[in-house]
Image (cartoon, rainbow, N blue to C red):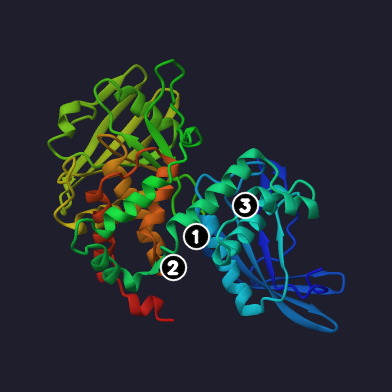
Amino acid sequence: MMWETKSSIIVMLTNLFENGKKKCQKYWPDFGTQRDFKQINVVCTQEEVIGCFVKRTFRIKLPEGAHDVTQFHYTTWPDHNIPITTTGLHRLKQAVMEQHKKSGESKPIVVHCSAGAGRTGTFIAFDSLSMQMNDRPSINVFDSVVNLRMQRMDMVQTQNQYMFLHKLVAEVYMLGQTDIPMMSLESKTKELERPGEKSGFATELEKLDSLNFNERNDHSRIISGINSESSYYNASFIEGYGLSGRILIAAKGPTSNTTENFWYAVIANQVHTIVSLRSSNEEPEEHCFPTMDQPWQTHDLTVNLLDERDIGNNIIKRSLLISQAQNANFEIGFYQLTSWMADTVPNNANDVLELIKKAQESQNQHKGRMLVYCNDGAGRTGAFLCILNLVERAKLEGRVDVLREVKDMRDMRVGMLQSKLLYRFVYYCMAEFVSTFDVYANFSG
């Protein structure tokens, strides 16, 4: 089919296995290898992870000739459901269209999921409606889906997918193009700082506030770890950059009343790195952690402090050992930024960037998830996690999109990063990161 239609692009919206069931046959060879399908020889010449999709290049050879095919494999769209966030799919579509333009827009794009209906129909409808917005005064989502279903049964299969399509289109219309090369971040930040009644930061926040779909975020709730009516802990899974999945957790900081639930949630969710954004004045008031002289204990659970030291940049590093009767002991890296007071931002952006570096080193060492908390699990925590994901993308792709990163955070946890002060700090923190990064060596064409 790819040969006969002269198609050079495949969009794959399913994983090979989902929920233990096989959804798609692996029809390509591994990178650097080849496979024969009767008279067709396929070689995988390139494989690159770009955010939440994998881009592969295949060389297809037949006796009568050869041509290249590019596959875009989106990995985070569950069957009969929808992705938690939208930006990954938006970037996938942009990458596909850029490749389509390079390869000649007359050639068809092959889109598939498992059944070729729900996810496939949603992606095709999103692309069609996005193009309609460029040259029409209005669009009609309902009519577009009906038109697709007249061509293929069950396109856009579920109510969730239909609602998700509206959300995708509304965001494109309301937000516009917000992704920029990281080399342009300094000038963009200065532009947003323009004098006047309303800054550019306030305008961007207003755009975000207008995208209130009033969705519940139960899909992001963590495992509590305690089987009781009081077992709920105020925390949410957060998607990390790329294909790493739910490796991050945003949480409200523990109090004297919720400490037990906090530690059981840490164990149940395999947290091996904890980041506290409560200042040195806030943290001791809660009495939630062990000291060198006194472990924290309850029932079958003990938390010991093995080591505590100041590592600079207003960061305290602690090594904790968790012991539970029915489970093996394990160590946790605990990092506290002591200078970030509630309702303020740090005086030095480098403190936050250094904290991210140390926390990631701990996560690489201990594996497991990283849990980040402040007093409400939304303000400082939201800003920190935004910066963390933005830094990772900037390092690998050389691009920055603060507005959409904040939007995705709000999709995963209600109330994330609401204040202009914090929003502005994210920009300035990223500008500081870019100023110390070897831009030319990594992204000069």
Indicate the secondary structure of the residue bearing disc 3. loop
- Reading the image, the residue beneath label 3 is 140
Q: Where's the C terminus, which quadrant? A: bottom left
Which of the 4 image quarters holds residue 107?
bottom right
Badge 3 amino acid: Asn
Label 3: few (<14), some or many (≥20) within 10 Å?
few
Q: Is residue 15 visible?
A: no
Q: Is residue 171 visible?
A: yes
Q: Is residue 340 above or below residue 262?
A: below
- Is the C-beta separation of discs 1 and 2 under 8 Å? yes
Q: Is residue 217 left or right of residue 295?
A: right
Q: Nearer the viewer, residue 54 or 187?
A: 187
Task: Determine the CA span between mark 3 and mark 2.
Answer: 34 Å
Q: Where's the N terminus, which quadrant? A: bottom right
> Looking at the image, is mark 3 or mark 2 nearer the viewer?
3
Residue 263 percent location from the top left of the image? 34, 28
Label 1: few (<14), some or many (≥20) within 10 Å?
many
Badge 2 amino acid: Glu
* Extreme residue in the front direction: 137
Q: Is residue 127 above or below residue 19?
A: below
Residue 188 percent location from the top left of the image? 30, 68
Residue pictured at 30% horizontal, 23% vertical: 258
Which dot marks residue 397?
2
Residue pictured at 29% horizontal, 62% vertical: 430
Indicate the secondary structure of the residue bearing disc 2. helix
Marked residue nearer the N-terminal end (3 or 2): 3
Which dot marks residue 51?
1
Marked residue nearer the N-terminal end (1 or 2): 1
Q: Is residue 148 above or below residue 306?
A: below
> Looking at the image, is mark 3 or mark 1 nearer the viewer?
3
Q: Is residue 288 above or below residue 184?
A: above
